Image (tube, rainbow, N blue to C red):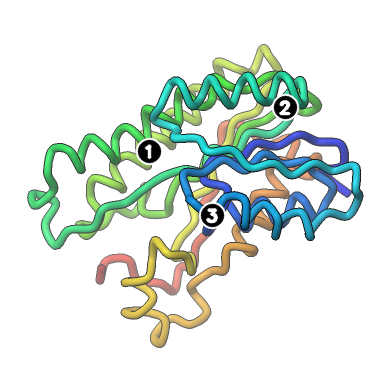
Amino acid sequence: MRFQDKVCVITGGTAGIGLGIAEKIISEGASVIACSVDKNIEEIVALLRTKRVDQSQRVEGLYVDVTSAKDRQTLVKFVEKEFGRIDVLFVNAGIVIYKKSQFDLTEEEYDRMININIKAAFFTIELLRKGKDANILVTSSATSVKPIKLGGIYTMTKSAVNNMVIWLAQELMDQDIRVNAILPGMVKTNMTKIQQKMYLDKYPRSLAEPWQIAAVAAMITSRDGSFINGENYLIDSKVFDWSNM
């Protein structure tokens, strides 16, 4: 089991890709702290505990607003007290706000995407405490390298994240901490409900399930991917035409 005895933190860990990652690494032996602002954290954690392969594994849920310094510190204190370290940090929390025109976004909506997708991602990474084969995986987006007008500001924030991953890998190399990002294409989550209605019939095999993205995430963050560092790993289908969005 690739994650046996590993302590993993996942922000945005109770839905979509984050939940898929949680299920995958728990099934491979990880102890997991799933962080979220969802109201049903306890319900999701109960479900995740059924995925354990060893009763020594711990699966905990914690309400964490990643934009709140206080909540981030609460997470740090919880991990230090209960686990003593983080081996893998999945920086997965993020939001998109769709508008027909990006000029229809309010300044508050603009700031919210910047704060969650860029600022909070950076300050969450500060939480890492070196463990076994310590590494960080950030969830970016395929649209970061193939921008679309429908979510222009979102794609801009994810491009910034890609940039951050490259220089952070250099900065943390001396601490033997790897930093990478995954850039998923269209994934069947609540975030893409509109797109699923538009494209699922035309591109049925080009839309990924969260567990498929999680499989790649597990490879990168396990011993299998221990040579990968500073990479923005595109997980997409060349068949899907983003230009039509």
Q: Residue, x 39% and y 61% (percent of image)?
A: 191
Residue type, mark 3 in image:
Asn
Q: Residues within 10 Å of mark 3 (few under 14, many from 20)?
A: few
Near-viewer residue (73 or 174)? 73
Considering only order in the chain, which callout, 1 or 2, is on the residue closer to the N terminus? 1
Q: Residues within 10 Å of mark 1 (few under 14, many from 20)?
A: many
Mark 3 lies on a secondary structure that is: loop
Res. 134 mark: 2
**Percent x, y for residue 150?**
22, 60
Relative placement, left or right, of 39 versus 226 is left
**Percent x, y for residue 18?**
57, 51
Examine the image and state in which quarter residue 211 appears: bottom right
Res. 210 mark: none
Q: Residue furthest top?
A: 174
224 vs 230: above or below: below
Relative placement, left or right, of 118 versus 36 is left
Q: Residue, x 32% and y 66% (percent of image)?
A: 242
Residue type, mark 1 in image:
Asn
Cα gap from disc 3 to disc 2, whole angstroms: 29 Å
Q: Disc 1 marks which residue?
A: 117
Considering only order in the chain, which callout, 2 or 3, is on the residue closer to the N terminus? 3
**Percent x, y for residue 105?**
13, 48
